[in-house]
Amino acid sequence: MNYKLQRYLRRNLEVKLRESLQSFPVTALLGPRQCGKSTLARHVVADRADTVYLDLEKPSDLSKLEDPEFFFHTQKDKLVCIDEV
């Protein structure tokens, strides 16, 4: 099998992102293409059991938001990370 190994480089922004997630109901992670936003987001939520991660480039994840009111209601006690908005 061919697995793509991805090396994570620690970022100063990681601490601020974690703090923001603890303090605010919504946190946006913005930046230019290919700067590591998705990698940082996946790393930050990886150790949290209460997380739902959606990659909106995947049709299966995008379809979960066909009824957003229902989806978010059923996930109300979880951290929902939406990538590729």
Image (spheres, rainbow, N blue to C red):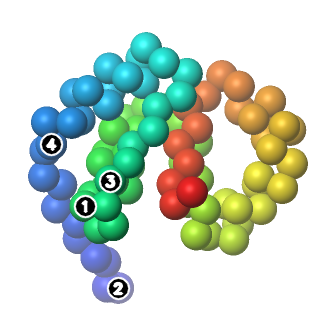
Q: Secondary structure at mark 2?
A: loop
Mark 3 or mark 4: which comes first in sequence? Answer: 4
Residue 33 appears at what percent x and percent y? 33, 67
User: Mark 1 Cα within 10 Å, few/some/many (few <14, many 20+)?
Assistant: few
Amino acid found under the numbered disc labelled 3: Gly
Amino acid found under the numbered disc labelled 1: Cys
Residue 38 appears at what percent x and percent y? 37, 56
Q: Which residue sits at x=32%, y=31%?
A: 17
Q: Which residue is mark 2?
A: 1
Q: CA distance from mark 4 to mark 2?
A: 30 Å
Q: Which residue is mark 4?
A: 11
Q: Nearer the viewer, mark 2 or mark 1?
A: 1
Residue 71 appears at what percent x and percent y? 79, 41
Of residues 67 and 44, the one nearer the viewer is: 67
Q: Quick check: marks 3 and 4 in contact, CB under 8 Å?
A: no
Q: Which residue is mark 3?
A: 31
Amino acid found under the numbered disc labelled 2: Met
User: Mark 2 Cα within 10 Å, few/some/many (few <14, many 20+)?
Assistant: few
Q: Quick check: marks 1 and 3 in contact, CB under 8 Å?
A: yes
Please give left or right for residue 48 compared with residue 59 in the image. Answer: left
Q: Report how many numbered discs are placed on residues in the image.
A: 4
Amino acid found under the numbered disc labelled 4: Arg
Q: Which residue is mark 1?
A: 35
Q: CA distance from mark 4 to mark 1?
A: 11 Å
Q: Secondary structure at mark 1?
A: loop
User: Mark 4 Cα within 10 Å, few/some/many (few <14, many 20+)?
Assistant: few
Q: CA distance from mark 3 to mark 4?
A: 14 Å
Q: Which numbered marker is on residue 53? A: none
Q: CA distance from mark 2 to mark 3?
A: 33 Å
Work out which quarter of the rendered image holds the C terminus and state it: bottom right
